[in-house]
Image: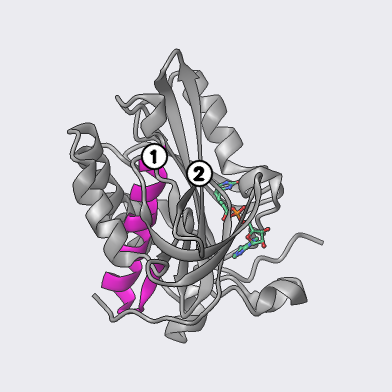
Amino acid sequence: MGIVCKMKLIELEKIMEQLKTDFIGQEIKYFAEATSTNDVAKELAAKGVKEGTIVLAETQTQGRGRLGRRWLSPEGGIWLSVILRPKIPAKDFYQLTFMAAVAVAKTIRRMFKLNAEIKWPNDVLVNDRKVCGILTESSVRGDAVDFAVIGIGVNANVDLASFPKDLRSSVTSLEAEVKGEVGRERFLCALLKELENYYTMIQQKKFEFVLEEWKSLTTLFGAHVEVTSFEGKVRGLAVGVNRNGGLEVLLKNGTIRKVLSGDVVKQKQQRRPLK
Ligand code: BT5
Protein backbone atom coordinates (compact mmCIF):
# COMPACT_ATOMS: atom_id res chain seq x y z
CA MET A 1 0.00 0.00 0.00
CA GLY A 2 1.35 3.43 -0.90
CA ILE A 3 1.61 6.33 1.52
CA VAL A 4 -1.54 8.44 1.47
CA CYS A 5 -0.80 12.15 1.58
CA LYS A 6 -3.93 14.09 2.52
CA MET A 7 -2.27 17.46 2.07
CA LYS A 8 -2.01 19.29 -1.24
CA LEU A 9 1.61 19.49 -2.35
CA ILE A 10 3.31 22.81 -2.98
CA GLU A 11 2.84 23.76 -6.64
CA LEU A 12 6.15 25.01 -7.98
CA GLU A 13 4.57 26.33 -11.20
CA LYS A 14 2.36 28.62 -9.13
CA ILE A 15 5.42 29.94 -7.33
CA MET A 16 7.28 30.63 -10.55
CA GLU A 17 4.21 32.45 -11.92
CA GLN A 18 3.70 34.64 -8.87
CA LEU A 19 7.27 35.27 -7.73
CA LYS A 20 8.37 38.88 -8.15
CA THR A 21 11.96 38.65 -6.89
CA ASP A 22 15.19 39.21 -8.77
CA PHE A 23 17.12 36.33 -7.27
CA ILE A 24 15.72 34.86 -4.05
CA GLY A 25 13.72 31.78 -5.00
CA GLN A 26 14.49 31.98 -8.70
CA GLU A 27 16.19 28.59 -8.26
CA ILE A 28 14.19 26.07 -6.21
CA LYS A 29 15.40 22.70 -4.95
CA TYR A 30 12.24 20.88 -3.92
CA PHE A 31 11.95 17.66 -1.93
CA ALA A 32 8.91 15.67 -0.84
CA GLU A 33 11.02 14.76 2.18
CA ALA A 34 14.37 16.03 3.38
CA THR A 35 16.42 15.39 6.48
CA SER A 36 16.78 19.11 7.20
CA THR A 37 16.50 21.73 4.48
CA ASN A 38 19.33 23.59 6.23
CA ASP A 39 21.64 20.58 5.85
CA VAL A 40 20.73 20.19 2.18
CA ALA A 41 21.21 23.93 1.64
CA LYS A 42 24.62 23.94 3.33
CA GLU A 43 25.79 21.13 1.06
CA LEU A 44 24.52 22.95 -2.02
CA ALA A 45 26.07 26.25 -0.90
CA ALA A 46 29.43 24.58 -0.36
CA LYS A 47 29.18 23.24 -3.92
CA GLY A 48 28.71 26.79 -5.17
CA VAL A 49 25.02 27.10 -6.12
CA LYS A 50 23.76 30.57 -6.95
CA GLU A 51 22.91 33.07 -4.25
CA GLY A 52 19.16 33.12 -3.67
CA THR A 53 18.68 29.40 -4.30
CA ILE A 54 16.07 28.01 -1.94
CA VAL A 55 15.50 24.52 -0.59
CA LEU A 56 11.90 23.53 0.11
CA ALA A 57 10.56 20.33 1.61
CA GLU A 58 7.06 19.04 2.30
CA THR A 59 8.35 17.28 5.43
CA GLN A 60 11.64 17.00 7.30
CA THR A 61 12.78 13.92 9.16
CA GLN A 62 15.49 15.76 11.10
CA GLY A 63 14.24 19.33 11.32
CA ARG A 64 16.47 21.26 13.70
CA GLY A 65 16.09 24.20 16.02
CA ARG A 66 18.88 25.96 17.88
CA LEU A 67 21.27 23.92 20.03
CA GLY A 68 20.27 20.75 18.20
CA ARG A 69 16.67 20.97 19.42
CA ARG A 70 14.07 19.13 17.40
CA TRP A 71 11.86 21.04 14.96
CA LEU A 72 8.66 19.21 14.14
CA SER A 73 8.05 19.35 10.41
CA PRO A 74 4.90 17.51 9.42
CA GLU A 75 3.18 17.94 6.06
CA GLY A 76 1.40 21.22 5.42
CA GLY A 77 4.18 23.45 6.72
CA ILE A 78 6.68 25.65 4.96
CA TRP A 79 10.15 24.23 5.59
CA LEU A 80 12.46 26.53 3.75
CA SER A 81 16.16 27.36 3.59
CA VAL A 82 17.55 30.32 1.68
CA ILE A 83 21.18 30.37 0.53
CA LEU A 84 22.82 33.79 0.67
CA ARG A 85 26.33 35.11 0.18
CA PRO A 86 26.22 38.31 2.22
CA LYS A 87 29.02 40.82 2.12
CA ILE A 88 29.04 41.41 5.84
CA PRO A 89 31.55 40.75 8.60
CA ALA A 90 30.88 37.65 10.67
CA LYS A 91 30.02 39.76 13.71
CA ASP A 92 26.99 41.17 11.85
CA PHE A 93 25.61 37.77 11.11
CA TYR A 94 22.72 38.20 13.56
CA GLN A 95 21.33 40.79 11.11
CA LEU A 96 20.18 37.94 8.87
CA THR A 97 18.11 36.36 11.63
CA PHE A 98 16.60 39.74 12.42
CA MET A 99 15.69 40.42 8.79
CA ALA A 100 14.14 36.95 8.41
CA ALA A 101 11.97 37.50 11.49
CA VAL A 102 10.87 40.90 10.18
CA ALA A 103 10.07 39.45 6.74
CA VAL A 104 7.99 36.62 8.21
CA ALA A 105 6.10 38.84 10.68
CA LYS A 106 5.38 41.45 8.00
CA THR A 107 4.16 38.86 5.51
CA ILE A 108 1.80 37.34 8.09
CA ARG A 109 0.48 40.78 9.05
CA ARG A 110 -0.04 41.93 5.47
CA MET A 111 -1.53 38.75 4.14
CA PHE A 112 -3.73 37.64 7.01
CA LYS A 113 -4.14 40.77 9.15
CA LEU A 114 -2.90 38.78 12.14
CA ASN A 115 -0.98 40.42 14.95
CA ALA A 116 2.34 38.66 14.30
CA GLU A 117 5.08 39.62 16.72
CA ILE A 118 8.77 38.85 17.04
CA LYS A 119 10.16 37.24 20.14
CA TRP A 120 13.89 37.74 20.48
CA PRO A 121 15.87 36.31 18.94
CA ASN A 122 14.28 34.02 16.38
CA ASP A 123 10.60 33.32 16.94
CA VAL A 124 7.51 34.75 15.33
CA LEU A 125 4.38 34.50 17.45
CA VAL A 126 0.70 34.99 16.79
CA ASN A 127 -1.47 35.47 19.87
CA ASP A 128 1.58 34.58 21.98
CA ARG A 129 2.02 31.21 20.30
CA LYS A 130 4.93 30.21 18.09
CA VAL A 131 4.02 30.03 14.42
CA CYS A 132 7.55 30.27 13.02
CA GLY A 133 11.13 29.54 14.05
CA ILE A 134 14.30 30.67 12.33
CA LEU A 135 17.68 28.95 12.30
CA THR A 136 20.45 30.89 10.59
CA GLU A 137 23.70 29.07 9.98
CA SER A 138 26.87 30.15 8.24
CA SER A 139 30.21 29.18 6.87
CA VAL A 140 32.78 31.76 7.83
CA ARG A 141 36.12 32.40 6.16
CA GLY A 142 38.41 34.60 8.23
CA ASP A 143 36.14 37.28 9.59
CA ALA A 144 33.82 37.29 6.58
CA VAL A 145 30.70 35.23 5.95
CA ASP A 146 31.33 32.82 3.06
CA PHE A 147 27.71 31.77 2.81
CA ALA A 148 24.68 31.85 5.03
CA VAL A 149 21.70 29.55 5.18
CA ILE A 150 18.54 31.01 6.62
CA GLY A 151 16.23 28.24 7.76
CA ILE A 152 12.62 29.27 8.20
CA GLY A 153 9.91 26.97 9.48
CA VAL A 154 6.33 28.22 9.28
CA ASN A 155 3.40 26.21 10.60
CA ALA A 156 1.18 27.02 7.66
CA ASN A 157 -1.43 24.23 7.42
CA VAL A 158 0.07 21.76 9.88
CA ASP A 159 -2.19 19.63 12.04
CA LEU A 160 -1.43 20.81 15.57
CA ALA A 161 -3.14 17.76 17.01
CA SER A 162 -0.15 15.78 15.75
CA PHE A 163 2.18 17.76 18.07
CA PRO A 164 3.12 16.38 21.47
CA LYS A 165 0.79 17.53 24.25
CA ASP A 166 3.37 19.66 26.05
CA LEU A 167 3.89 21.77 22.92
CA ARG A 168 0.26 22.28 21.95
CA SER A 169 -0.40 25.20 24.27
CA SER A 170 2.59 27.18 23.00
CA VAL A 171 2.33 26.68 19.22
CA THR A 172 -0.09 27.69 16.53
CA SER A 173 -0.50 27.51 12.77
CA LEU A 174 -1.64 30.04 10.20
CA GLU A 175 -4.52 27.74 9.36
CA ALA A 176 -5.67 27.68 13.00
CA GLU A 177 -5.42 31.47 13.27
CA VAL A 178 -7.25 32.33 10.06
CA LYS A 179 -9.60 29.36 10.47
CA GLY A 180 -8.98 28.01 7.01
CA GLU A 181 -6.27 26.56 4.83
CA VAL A 182 -3.75 29.12 3.60
CA GLY A 183 -2.16 29.21 0.15
CA ARG A 184 1.44 28.24 0.75
CA GLU A 185 2.59 29.34 -2.69
CA ARG A 186 1.17 32.85 -2.27
CA PHE A 187 2.67 33.11 1.20
CA LEU A 188 6.06 31.93 -0.01
CA CYS A 189 6.14 34.40 -2.89
CA ALA A 190 5.31 37.31 -0.59
CA LEU A 191 7.83 36.14 2.01
CA LEU A 192 10.65 35.74 -0.52
CA LYS A 193 9.96 39.25 -1.85
CA GLU A 194 10.13 40.72 1.68
CA LEU A 195 13.32 38.79 2.36
CA GLU A 196 14.91 40.14 -0.79
CA ASN A 197 13.95 43.72 0.11
CA TYR A 198 15.41 43.50 3.61
CA TYR A 199 18.47 41.59 2.45
CA THR A 200 19.18 44.31 -0.11
CA MET A 201 19.08 46.87 2.72
CA ILE A 202 21.63 44.85 4.68
CA GLN A 203 23.88 44.54 1.63
CA GLN A 204 23.65 48.31 1.23
CA LYS A 205 24.71 48.74 4.86
CA LYS A 206 21.29 50.03 5.86
CA PHE A 207 20.60 47.59 8.65
CA GLU A 208 19.25 50.41 10.81
CA PHE A 209 16.05 50.36 8.72
CA VAL A 210 15.63 46.64 9.32
CA LEU A 211 16.30 47.16 13.02
CA GLU A 212 13.66 49.87 13.25
CA GLU A 213 11.09 47.48 11.76
CA TRP A 214 12.31 44.74 14.08
CA LYS A 215 11.89 46.97 17.12
CA SER A 216 8.35 47.92 16.12
CA LEU A 217 7.44 44.24 15.79
CA THR A 218 9.00 42.87 18.95
CA THR A 219 6.92 42.09 21.99
CA LEU A 220 9.63 42.23 24.56
CA PHE A 221 10.59 45.80 25.23
CA GLY A 222 9.15 47.03 28.49
CA ALA A 223 8.23 43.51 29.56
CA HIS A 224 9.56 41.64 32.59
CA VAL A 225 11.49 38.69 31.26
CA GLU A 226 13.48 35.70 32.35
CA VAL A 227 16.27 34.79 29.96
CA THR A 228 17.99 31.42 30.13
CA SER A 229 21.40 31.35 28.49
CA PHE A 230 24.70 29.51 28.81
CA GLU A 231 25.53 31.80 31.67
CA GLY A 232 22.41 30.89 33.65
CA LYS A 233 19.17 32.77 34.25
CA VAL A 234 18.74 36.52 34.16
CA ARG A 235 15.58 38.30 35.34
CA GLY A 236 14.71 41.90 34.64
CA LEU A 237 13.11 44.37 32.30
CA ALA A 238 13.88 43.94 28.58
CA VAL A 239 14.96 47.40 27.46
CA GLY A 240 16.58 47.01 24.05
CA VAL A 241 18.99 45.23 21.76
CA ASN A 242 22.61 46.18 21.37
CA ARG A 243 24.72 46.44 18.22
CA ASN A 244 25.42 42.70 18.22
CA GLY A 245 21.78 41.71 18.40
CA GLY A 246 22.08 40.91 22.11
CA LEU A 247 19.13 41.54 24.42
CA GLU A 248 19.62 44.23 27.03
CA VAL A 249 18.03 43.45 30.36
CA LEU A 250 17.75 46.00 33.14
CA LEU A 251 18.41 44.22 36.41
CA LYS A 252 16.90 45.09 39.78
CA ASN A 253 20.19 46.60 40.88
CA GLY A 254 20.00 49.14 38.06
CA THR A 255 22.70 47.64 35.83
CA ILE A 256 22.10 46.48 32.26
CA ARG A 257 23.02 42.91 31.36
CA LYS A 258 23.55 41.99 27.69
CA VAL A 259 22.56 38.48 26.71
CA LEU A 260 23.85 37.36 23.31
CA SER A 261 21.71 34.28 22.89
CA GLY A 262 19.18 32.43 24.95
CA ASP A 263 15.52 31.67 25.51
CA VAL A 264 13.18 34.31 26.82
CA VAL A 265 10.00 33.91 28.79
CA LYS A 266 7.84 36.95 29.33
CA GLN A 267 6.70 37.31 32.92
CA LYS A 268 3.66 39.45 32.10
CA GLN A 269 1.28 39.56 29.16
CA GLN A 270 1.57 42.54 26.87
CA ARG A 271 -0.11 43.22 23.55
CA ARG A 272 0.86 45.63 20.83
CA PRO A 273 -1.51 47.12 18.29
CA LEU A 274 -1.66 45.81 14.74
CA LYS A 275 0.74 47.82 12.58
C1 BT5 B 1 13.86 27.41 16.21
O1 BT5 B 1 14.68 26.86 17.15
O2 BT5 B 1 12.81 27.95 16.44
C2 BT5 B 1 14.37 27.28 14.78
C3 BT5 B 1 13.53 26.40 13.91
C4 BT5 B 1 13.97 26.42 12.49
C5 BT5 B 1 13.23 25.44 11.64
C6 BT5 B 1 13.59 25.56 10.19
S1 BT5 B 1 12.56 24.58 9.18
C7 BT5 B 1 13.60 24.79 7.81
C8 BT5 B 1 15.02 24.71 8.35
N1 BT5 B 1 15.48 23.34 8.42
C9 BT5 B 1 15.74 22.96 9.68
O3 BT5 B 1 16.17 21.84 10.02
N2 BT5 B 1 15.48 23.96 10.52
C10 BT5 B 1 15.02 25.15 9.82
P1 BT5 B 1 14.49 27.01 18.71
O4 BT5 B 1 14.34 28.46 19.07
O5 BT5 B 1 15.61 26.25 19.30
O6 BT5 B 1 13.11 26.32 19.02
C11 BT5 B 1 12.97 24.93 19.02
C12 BT5 B 1 11.78 24.60 19.91
O7 BT5 B 1 10.55 24.99 19.26
C13 BT5 B 1 11.61 23.12 20.20
O8 BT5 B 1 12.40 22.72 21.28
C14 BT5 B 1 10.11 23.01 20.49
O9 BT5 B 1 9.86 23.43 21.81
C15 BT5 B 1 9.51 24.07 19.58
N3 BT5 B 1 9.02 23.50 18.30
C16 BT5 B 1 9.42 22.40 17.64
N4 BT5 B 1 8.77 22.26 16.48
C17 BT5 B 1 7.91 23.31 16.40
C18 BT5 B 1 6.98 23.75 15.42
N5 BT5 B 1 6.78 23.11 14.26
N6 BT5 B 1 6.29 24.88 15.69
C19 BT5 B 1 6.46 25.59 16.82
N7 BT5 B 1 7.35 25.22 17.78
C20 BT5 B 1 8.07 24.10 17.56
Ligand 1 quadrant in view: bottom right
Residue at image location 58% in from the left, 70% down from the top: 158
Asked whether the viewer can see residue 21, the reply is no
Query: Vertically, is 14 above or below 146?
Result: below
CB-based contact (under 8 Å), mark 1 and mark 2: yes
Q: Which tag, 1 or 2, sits closer to the chain's start? A: 1
Distance from Cα at disc 1 to Cα at disc 2: 8 Å
Kindly identify which residue carries mark 2: 260
Q: Label 1 is placed on what type of residue? A: Asn
Expressed as whole percent of the image width and height from the top left, the position of residue 37 reads: 57, 42
Judge left or right: residue 244 versus residue 31. left
Q: Label 2 is placed on what type of residue? A: Leu
Identify the image quadrant of residue 217: bottom left
Residue at image location 29% in from the left, 24% down from the top: 87
Q: Secondary structure at mark 1?
A: loop
Q: Secondary structure at mark 2?
A: loop
Image quarter in which the N terminus is found = bottom right
Image quarter in which the C terminus is found = bottom left
Category of crowding for the residue at label 1, using alpha-carbon neighbours closer than 10 angstroms: few (below 14), some (14–19), many (at least 20): some
Kindly identify which residue carries mark 1: 244
**Residues drawn in magenta:** 94-117
Expressed as whole percent of the image width and height from the top left, the position of residue 168 reads: 67, 77
Judge left or right: residue 207 versus residue 89. left
Q: Decide whether residue 206 is among the magenta residues.
A: no
Asked whether the viewer can see residue 94, the reply is yes
